[in-house]
């Protein structure tokens, strides 16, 4: 897929891609940026240093990754990539609860954004984020939410990407 838009969002997998694209479509944002499934957190770590120093038309780069069971470790790995690039001197020690947006010291480089699922605060993943969006129901809330998320992810994969 050719990357033309100056704003790009990298995600770990196909479920993430479908959720982000469909949320963005509902908010009429999809035309403003591209979403790319990189395949895994480890692959994102591999491509990030190169993309940060990109000289093509890319102006803003965001990534959405799962915390899984290691929120602090995932933040530290990404933080070190940002610091090692020597493009961003204002990278905080702690991941901001509202997510990270960091501007490069030289405006010729890329503005970078980060969101660690589910909420920059808890271990977890995309499915937990989606669970938070489902209104609570009667007694078996957790079981019902899990079933709802699985159905939602199944259905969202069937929708065409816009």
Image: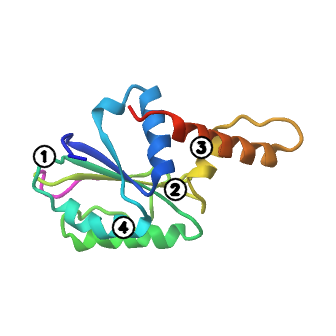
- Please give the label number shown on residue 120: 2
Tell me the crowding category of disc 1: few under 14, some 14 to 19, or many 20 or more residues within 10 angstroms, Cα based: few
- Residue numbers of the magenta segment: 101-107
Residue 101 appears in view: no
Q: Residue at x 19, y 70 (%)?
A: 86
Report the predominant secondary structure element of the magenta stretch: loop
- Say if 120 sits above or below 76 in the image: above
Q: Earlier in the sequence, mark 2 or mark 3?
A: 2
Tell me the crowding category of disc 4: few under 14, some 14 to 19, or many 20 or more residues within 10 angstroms, Cα based: few
Q: Secondary structure at mark 2?
A: loop
Mark 4 lies on residue:
43
Tell me the crowding category of disc 3: few under 14, some 14 to 19, or many 20 or more residues within 10 angstroms, Cα based: some
Mark 3 lies on residue:
153
Q: Earlier in the sequence, mark 2 or mark 4?
A: 4
Q: How many marks?
A: 4
* Cα–Cα gap, marks 1 and 3: 33 Å
* Cα–Cα gap, marks 2 and 3: 21 Å
Residue 94 appears in view: yes
Q: Secondary structure at mark 3?
A: helix
- Please give the label number shown on residue 57: 1
Q: Earlier in the sequence, mark 1 or mark 4?
A: 4
- Say if 135 sits above or below 61 in the image: above
Q: Quadrant of the C terminus?
A: top left
Q: Position of residue 133 (x, y in %)?
A: 63, 38
Q: Nearer the viewer, mark 1 or mark 2?
A: 1
Q: Position of residue 141 (x, y in %)?
A: 81, 43
Q: Residue at x 52, y 41 (%)?
A: 157
């Amino acid at each position: 897929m050719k990357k033309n838009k100056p704003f790009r969002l990298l995600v770990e997998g196909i479920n993430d891609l479908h959720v982000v694209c469909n949320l963005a479509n509902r908010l009429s944002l999809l035309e403003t940026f591209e979403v790319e499934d990189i395949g895994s957190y480890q692959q994102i770590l591999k491509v990030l240093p190169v993309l940060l120093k990109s000289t093509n038309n890319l102006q803003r780069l965001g990534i959405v990754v799962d915390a899984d069971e290691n929120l602090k470790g995932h933040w530290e790995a990404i933080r070190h990539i940002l610091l090692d690039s020597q493009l961003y001197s204002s990278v905080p020690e702690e991941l901001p609860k509202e997510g990270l947006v960091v501007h490069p010291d030289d405006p010729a480089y890329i503005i970078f954004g980060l969101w660690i699922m589910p909420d920059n605060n808890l271990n977890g993943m995309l499915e937990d984020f989606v669970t938070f969006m489902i209104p609570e129901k009667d007694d078996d809330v957790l079981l019902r939410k899990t079933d709802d998320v699985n159905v939602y992810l199944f259905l969202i994969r069937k929708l065409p990407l816009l």
